[in-house]
Image (cartoon, grey):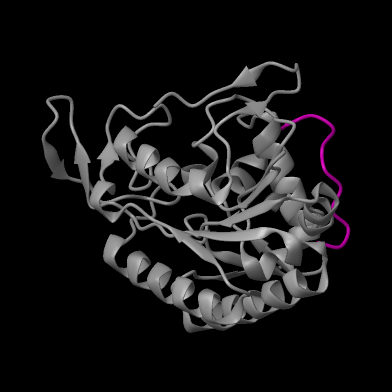
Amino acid sequence: MPRVAIIGSCITRDLWPIRGEAERLLYVSRTSLPSLFSEPVKGFRPAEAPPAGLGRHQHRAVIADLEKTALAALVAFQPTHLIFDFIDERFDLLAVKAALVTRSWELEVSGYLTRKAFAGARSIPRLSPACRRLWSHGAAEMAAFVRATPLKDARLILHSARWADCYRGARGRPRPLPTPEILPGRPEEIAAHNRLLAAYEAEFAALMPPLERVEAPQHRLADEGHRWGLSPFHYVADYYEEIWRQLEPLGVEREVTGRDGAPSVQAA
């Protein structure tokens, strides 16, 4: 049976509507390629329970990024399919002594940045040349890692995506999307991030073993009624259906099993 691993964002995870964990689905999120291959944050100890404002998965994603456990979990999962999408590659990085971490909204909310382990942390803006160099190094490390581990036997898939600049409102008509914010008070330029995504994808494809590619540019329209709210990467239903149309011939199944054993099927 297919076992799907995702290194990416909710645009891929939302293809499966099951809430919580699933037996044949591994989701690595709120990270960045340079952060994945960094050493852990020295002296960091996570809270036993999620801090206020975070769910269990959100907290686990933060911990995995700080403790650098995702790659070992990925290999142990033994995926038959490994899907990459780079929408989470929008957050700044933080240099914490010798470690690199992803400055996600979840990390900000966690309160961990006020701890001693993060004293002197330095921000590396996502659109800066320094971040681009770090990302290129991380992409090369990912290519080498895949080739050197059992991941080389997985079917590799790039889910190519961009930030939408329009959304479908309540009356069904496309409207210009308001200027988005990655973090509160931090407006971002959609076109700049889309140029970066295009560059990331081209570089990654050149480095990696052969990748399948799925994309739905004709349906890149944000949805005001999306279950996670209005965002440049919360798309209309037609987007996800088109991606499924391309994934199924690659052996990816719509049905996954939850921890309680109940199947969940994406409706067409």
Residue 116 visible in the current orientation: no
Q: Residue at 61% across / 75% down in the picture?
A: 208
Q: What residue is shown at x 50% (from left), y 70% (from top)?
A: 125
Q: Main secondary structure of the magenta part?
A: loop
Question: In the visual, does 47 lie left or right of 103?
Answer: right
249 versus 236 height, above or below: below
Tell me if 105 is positioned left or right of 75 in this view.
left
Q: Which quarter of the rendered picture does the C terminus lie within?
A: top left
- How many dots with numbers? 0
Residue depicted at x 27% and y 31%? 224
Q: Looking at the picture, how far across and down is residue 40, in whole percent?
A: 82, 62
* Magenta span includes 50: yes
- Where 250 sits versus 205, above or below? above
Q: Position of residue 118 (x, y in %)?
A: 74, 60
Q: Position of residue 170 (x, y in %)?
A: 17, 25
Q: Tell which residue pokes out farthest to the front in this image.
A: 249
**Residue 204 part of the magenta-drawn span:** no
As drawn, 128 above or below 183: below
In this picture, residue 82 sits left or right of residue 198: right
Magenta residues span 41-51
